[in-house]
Each structure stands twice: as C-alpha cells, then as structure tokens.
Image: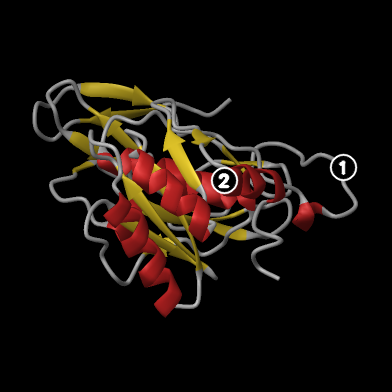
Amino acid sequence: MSESVSVRCPACRREHLYAAPSYPCVCGAPVRPPLDTAGTATAVTHQVWDEQWVSLRCASCGRRDEWPRPELGCPCGTVLRVPVMSSATTTDARPPTTTEPARARRVLQPVTIRTPRDAATAAALYLRSLGYQDIRRADQRPPSGIGLAARGLLAQVDPAIRPASLRDVECLWLTAMTESAACVHFSLAGYTDEARARAEGLDIPLFVLELNGIPKPLNAPAVRLDASGAQDRNR
C-alpha cells in the first residue's frame, strides 16, 4: 500500500491526501513514483508532453522506463503536479517467478479519459503494454489529434468528438511511409465507413478508446496487433 502524502493546492489552499498509483514493470513488479514529502505541488498551467512523464527504474530487474508523472485534480479546477524524489528507483513487491522476464507482456493499467492528454496517455500505456519502447511526442504534428512515436511506429490519437475521417487515416499512413514506420490510429469517437475501408486496405490498425482508457480493436490489423504485440512489427 502506498503512503499518502498531503498536497496543498496553491490556488485555493485546499489540502488533499494523495497516494501515487503503481504501474507494472515488464518483469511484473509494481513500480511506484517516489513522492517528495518535502516538496511543494505546483499548478499546471500549460501541458508539455515531455514534462508529463517521469523516468523510473525498477529495483527488481533494473529496467528504466517512462511513466505518467503524478498529478491531482483539485475541485477548484487547478491541476496539481505532485513532486517526485530525484532518486526515481522504486518497487514495492517481489516480481513473479519467470525464466524470461524481458519477454513478458506488461499488464495494462489504464487511465480514465477526461481530457485529450488522458487519451494520449492511455494510448501510450497501451503501446508500452504491447512492447513498444521509448514512446515520445511525434516530431511531425498531425493535421488533427496528437502524434506519438516509438521505434518503428507512428501513432495518432484523436480525442475529438467526431469520427476520424478518411483524410486522417491517409495522412497518418503517408507520414509513416516517409519515416519507414508502421502506424496505428486511436480515436475516441470511432471512424467513418470510408476511413475503416481505407485502413483495411492499407493494413492500419484502428482502435477506439473507451472512456475507461482501454483501447478496443476495431479492425483485423488491430486484432492482430493486440494479439501479437510489438514483436512481429519490430522484426
């Protein structure tokens, strides 16, 4: 059980008790951001992708990975960034016994989607559960939504309330082609019939992001990706 810390909102001065969530390392051990009890929470006024992640090293297997930085929403409307200790190496349980921990598929721990940033975080966590590493903000910004990139993969996350269009799918495919990468699309509102048909022809996995943060495969390429993970695409 994670220890709760007191977090004061700098805007309304209200105090909250906050416990950092744990995330499963690829070896199976839960990893939790070590909170800085002496630090002060800060208000997030502008979301910057690189600042939304913290690097944590699993004390069980030594693997370092990027995880969502702890944040807390105050009822006054302020988003609070909870300080993390600089020595971000942590685990709070023994890993399960396994002969090849690096090949184990990470258990997905989804985040509830309330904002576009949550949608991008949910997609990034899902891709990491499939085995994709070094997920970052894509160099090229897509015409709509949020672009993510990993080694050999380009992803687009569309948090809009309209279904993703044929143009969205084709632009993603063309951009991926120029980078010699595979691609995958996530949408909150689904896809038009034309977009789905084109994605099937181009072998682009389409996912619908449920509000609970779990991506639902929508076509055959997505079903295959969900079943096989990143191994086949990274060969």
* Quadrant where the image shows the N terminus: top right
Q: Is residue 2 above or below residue 65?
A: above
Crowding around mark 2 (Cα neighbors within 10 Å: few <14, some 14 to 19, many 20+) is many
- The residue depicted at 65 percent of the width and 68 percent of the height is 234
**Which residue type carries mark 1?**
Thr
Residue designated by label 1:
97
The foreground one among 88 and 214 is: 214
| Image coordinates for residue 12, horizontal then vertical, percent | 9, 26
| Image coordinates for residue 187, horizontal then vertical, percent | 36, 41
Q: Report the residue that reaches farthest toward the left.
A: 11
Q: Earlier in the sequence, mark 1 or mark 2?
A: 1
To which quarter of the image does residue 42 belong? top left
Q: Is residue 109 visible?
A: yes
- The residue depicted at 42 percent of the width and 35 percent of the height is 209
Residue designated by label 2:
222
- Quick check: 145 left or right of 220? left
Q: CA distance from mark 1 to mark 2?
A: 30 Å
Crowding around mark 1 (Cα neighbors within 10 Å: few <14, some 14 to 19, many 20+) is few
Give the label on residue 22, or none: none
Q: Is residue 13 above or below residue 131?
A: above
